[in-house]
Image: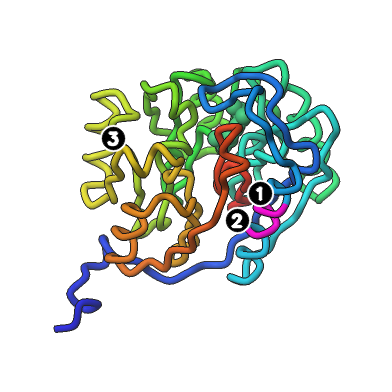
Amino acid sequence: MTATSARSTETSAGQATRRHYLMCPPAYFTVEYVINPWMDPDQPVDTALAVAQWEELKNTYLRLGHTVDTIEPQPGLPDMVFAANSGTVIEGRVLGAKFRAPERAAEAEHFRRWFLAHGYRDVVMPTRINEAEGDFAWTGEVLLAGTGFRTDPAAHAEAQEFLGVPVVSLNLVDERYYHLDTALFVLDKAPNAQIAYFPEAFSEGSRRVLARMFPDAVIADEADAACLGLNGVSDGRHVVLPEEATGLAKQLDDRGYEVIPLDMSELRKSGGGPKCCTMELHS
Ligand code: ARG
């Protein structure tokens, strides 16, 4: 028996599926305020390098056959590059964002307008703090939802009601992993939904929930988490990761995924990685 045929369908990579992403070029990217432990305004930021890293990410998606839309960046909104935080889109319904930090509040309206201008009819803005795909991960079956640092737990109920999908709330307990997407990502959607995560970022009860729902999940270690390796983007087969996440890359490779390591070092100065830069418009 070959290694490939020995893999069970739940634990190995499946087929890639075409994805539709929305991204925002980091033209005004910088670190000038502190809203997470990664941010240090005294550390210099090379905006041109951030743009080059972002272009590489975007070109990777295009090369894989995905569709990438972009939204116009805005001066004065240095974190707007983190498009994942501005909307949760499932089957045409758009739940916008309501940021915790006043510095980011204005981003939400730019994205709301983008959706309206691009033919989305069901666009609703949350009444509770909701940092969208930063804290929401769609498995195709359930919406995994993080809380603890940013998104209000009441926003989870709001998401369930508007999107009409079951929501599973998870508690984040380590401030370095302030958004769900810094501690967990979806490798494969239902019917063989699979995730990778860093258990220590979650409360004891939430760890038990994840172990119950995903007994064969890829378990990342501290070194993978500390380079924001859990901020990956998968199309079901190809997985874009920060290049430092070598342990995680090895585990994914063993399961038949094709890992694409990228240098995201400049965007990490703001606490971001590939996924933060990528809002998926789930059809
Ligand atoms: N500086 C941004 C913030 O703290 C980074 C957001 C990263 N985005 C994400 N989806 N985790 O809000």
Local secondary structure at mark 3: helix
Determine the quadrant in which ligand 1 lies.
top right
How dense is the environment of label 3, judged by Cα within 10 Å: few (below 14), some, or many (20 and up)? Answer: many
Q: Which residue is disc 1 drawn over? A: 92
* The C terminus sits in image quarter: bottom right
Q: Which residue is disc 2 drawn over? A: 283
Report the amino acid beneath label 1. Answer: Gly
Q: Which residue is disc 3 drawn over? A: 199
- Residue 165's place in the image compared with 157, above or below, is below
Task: Please tell me which residue lies in front, 273 or 30.
Answer: 30
Task: Please tell me which residue lies in front, 220 or 41.
Answer: 41
The mark closer to the camera, 2 or 3, is 3
Q: Residue at x 38, y 23 (%)?
A: 174
Report the amino acid beneath label 3. Answer: Pro
Q: Residue at x 54, y 57 (%)?
A: 262
Q: Is 33 covered by the magenta stretch?
A: no
Query: Taking 8 as reference, is 192 left or right?
Result: right
Local secondary structure at mark 2: loop
Q: Which residues are magenta?
A: 52-56
Local secondary structure at mark 1: loop
Q: Is residue 223 something one can see in this rendering?
A: yes
Residue 29 spot, x, y in % from top left: 74, 36
